[in-house]
Image: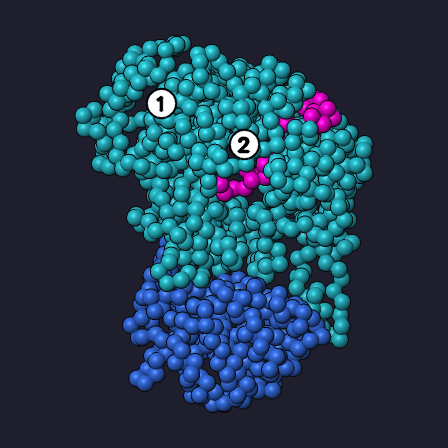
Amino acid sequence: MAVVGGERGKTHVHDLPEAVLSQVLELVRDVRSRNAVALVCRKWRFLERLTRTSLSLRGHIRNPFLLPTCFPSVSHLDLSLLSPWGYHPFHYLPAPTRLDGYLHPDNYNDHHHLLAADQQHLVAQRLGQAFPNVMSLTVYARDPSALQALAPHWPGLRHAKLVRWHQRPQNPLGADVAPLLAACSSLLSLDLSHFYCWTEDLPPALQAYPAAAASLACLDLLSASSAEGFRASELAAIAAACPNLRHLLASCVFNPRYFGFVGDASLQALAAACPRLSLLHLVDPSTLSSARPTHDPADNDLTQDDAAITATGLESLFAALPELEDLAFDLGHNVRDAGPALEALGRKCPRIKSLKLGHLHGVCKAVWLHLDGVSLCGGLETLSVKNCPDLTDAGLATIARGCRRLSRLEIHGCGKVTETGVKKLASMLRSTLVDVRISGCRQLDAAQSLRALEPVRDRIERLHVDCVWVRPELKRSPENMAKAAANLDDLLEFEEQEISDELRDKKCSRHWEEECVDDGDPSKSSDSSSGFWCWIWDRLRFLSVWVPAGEVLSPLVDAGLDCCPELEEICIKVEGDCRTCPKPAQRVFGLSSLSRYPRLAKMKLDCGEAIGYALTAPTGHMDLSLWERFYLHGIGDLNLYELDYWPPQDKEVNQRSLSLPATGLIQECLTLRKLFIHGTTHEHFMRFFLAMPNLRDVQLREDYYPAPENDTSTKMRVDSCSRFEDALNSTLIPD
Amino acid sequence: MGGSNSNWSSGGATGSKLLEMLNVRVVGNADRPALVLSHGVGTDQSAWNRIVPYFQRDYRIVLYDLVCAGSVNPDHFDFRRYVTLDAYVDDLLAILDALRIDRCFFVGHSVSAMIGILAAIRRPDAFLKLILIGASPRFLNDEEYHGGFGEGEIETVLAAMESNYEAWVRGFAPLAVGADVPAAVREFSRTLFNMRPDITLFVSRTVFNSDLRGVLGLVQVPCVIVQTAKDVSVPLSVARYLKDRLGGRTTIEVLHHTEGHLPHLSAPAALVPVIRRSLSR
């Protein structure tokens, strides 16, 4: 917030010369604060506009005279959210031909909201004039014409992010990226993580413009919609074209059964071509899909294929990349005995801070008392271990001993990890651990995960648990804690702890009794022997939960998340097949149970991976309107400021759409200011949202692949969106 | 540019304005005969998405939304005009005039089948053939006629819609959905709850009050009645009733392995050959 202090009658902030004031305003980053600054007086508004550096344009591009020209310092410009969403700024139609007095049928379908050919150059030029200092650009590049028009206006562009969720148009290879590389030869970073194109598109484009390729330092190619991944030859071509790469993120073909798979040799070639890599993320394309894989890694240990990458190959890779700081190797196939490779990582890459490993076995064996495997990477701050079936509680304890600076931990699909292991790790890393994600582990349901994090309960800021309910009640008495602590002592002989277990238990039980809060809710009383008490998660700001389809959310509170005074943001992901799961026992999902968190303002409710029937449900099945009613009931009780909602989908008809009860229930959330629906909906239903008094920002973002394109509803919706936005913009806003 | 026998009481939109309002879309081969696809209440023209690709090469396909569809601006729904199905027929004929289509094939689902029948009576020479999917001249049961829906069942549906309407008017969430009603009406009403509550109520009353049994004999155009093996909303007896009463040459095609009221959504692969066969004869 801008400092507005001043003694009464003496100097006032207005007396500051403009140069000083503009320096002060330049430091204000938060968008709402800047908006508040702009409302103070004309001079402040002018200065605020002058110093704003980042801008995301919304609104409709059909009126180029409405482009704001008062932001000359903008260096980061985001054009990907222009309305209508998904139509890049220069989607134009050729002049309608008139045959025999009526419009040619092909052109008839595009209405007057699209730009004519000569207008697009005007708009591009205007954008270039209005924002002369743009260094970083995000644009929805549905086809190359957008970049062809825009890129020449900013030849000094350093960062570019392209977005496309629609299908790739029929163009020669590399045509999408070529205009950008041609015009901006000093490009530093290119982000294609939300851009759908083919893997064969990139190497020819990079090879055609060697100057731009050589200046590239960051290349993000983790496109979630690419089902294949880069082949070894393509990876080599990219590495050869961009020798100065420092950050590379790409999905690769690791399956040894596929032609052109990436193995040890390709990794060596990569390291040889780009020795200065400090961030390397190579993942298997299957890990990028938002749905969880259904197999349980512990069972399929033998049937799952091995990758073509071996531990020795990894060792030589690490030896060749000494500047590595951030590494992700999220594979879909097993790499056996990875322990020695990770020890080599710790030795050869001293700066390593962040590590993500998927399907690597032997990450930390903890057979003897010494540190081994990943625990030898002492500087690690972020560790994510996915699908490692042989990681045990002892392994976790060893990691905690070795990586003393660990602040973020993620465990996914590690079947042997139990509550005691996590608790041990949490207690040893109490001073640094702030972000924990536990998912997909068979022996860690929600209640156990929350109990296991008891040592860091007052420090943790971000948390993810899976909402798997095994037992309806749980015992949380201090006696159980002591028993668990005694078991831990038996497990490990060599202890390096700051506080002894019993002492800590006593402190905690006093903490519980002192903090006993009784809000008169009878459902909260669980254990009569220790009276009423609740767990306080003092610093928890962000919570993420994963819920299988058909499960309810309300037991989460009883499982341990009673009191989270600072919780601001929650992310709920529902996944599964609603067609096969039985009718839920409770009538509602339980969103209203979240109203106990006083500061909850932002919610992401992702039902996009919940599959069901939209209109064609056979007799006896629930259709999606019933499911949406189930999930969204109670959302009006929460004082949400921002909501991102992904409706459940009907895969047969490729429909992700709001139904009547969903619209009505969302409309009840009167404090909502921003609403983003990641799907489609009717105009009839969008009109419901106009009744919400505080709503400022609504957009339908179909950011999943393939975004509906020739779907007639979408085309019509362009007009509907325009009408809706005009209506929304003309409503009076109370504040 | 309206037809010569247009008799709008309060005057609807004409020509190109109507084309825009109802999101008319023409795809396919412009040199071939016209095929008009008309959806049932509660869906919109996207319901035909899985059918269109099969006919794009051989026909000039015309798609449009009924005025009550969820994707049409609700301000265009004139409550005084769309009291009976005649106004919908006016719209259809106006579209044909605006696009200068003299003769066409017509595929109508559910309520659009009723609209097609009425249109064919009014302008027999405009329609080469009518293909009626899930059609019924009257949905309500009568003394001797079994339309599929009993009086009590209709009342439940309308009561659910009325509660939705009440909630909507007062700013609450309209929570009743098509699956809250008795099983016999469930599949049909599922689509009905896909519109704004006041439009839903109005259109449902229109639909359930329509009775075309008396005028079936006036149809001269050949018809094909497409029926699924088990459609709870339209019993097979209704299909036979139609075949007996329709004035033109009529055949029944049954989709044997398909169930449900929306075969173009749930089983397009079974429906396409049937339509193709009907169009070619």
Residue A619: x and y, percent? 37, 63
Q: Residue at x 70, y 22 (%)?
A: A276
What subunit carries mark 1? A
Label 2 secondary element = strand
Label 2 to label 1: alpha-carbon separation = 27 Å
The location of residue B50, given as percent across then percent down, is 56, 63
Residue A536 colored in magenta in the image: no
Per the image, the residue denoted by label 1 is: A420
Task: Report the residue marked by disc 2.
Answer: A334
Residue A527 vertical position relative to residue A80 in the rendered view, above or below: above
The magenta stretch spans which residues? A268-293
Q: Residue at x 50, y 90 (%)?
A: B247
Is residue A362 found left or right of A585 in the rendered image?
A: right
Secondary structure type for disc 1? helix
Above or below for A625 versus A351: below
What residue is shown at x 41% (from left), y 19% (from top)?
Answer: A394
Q: Position of residue A37 (x, y in %)?
A: 57, 32
The reply to whether the magenta stretch includes residue A291 is yes
Task: Identify which amino acid the numbered label 2 is placed on.
Answer: Asn
> Which chain is the one coloured blue?
B
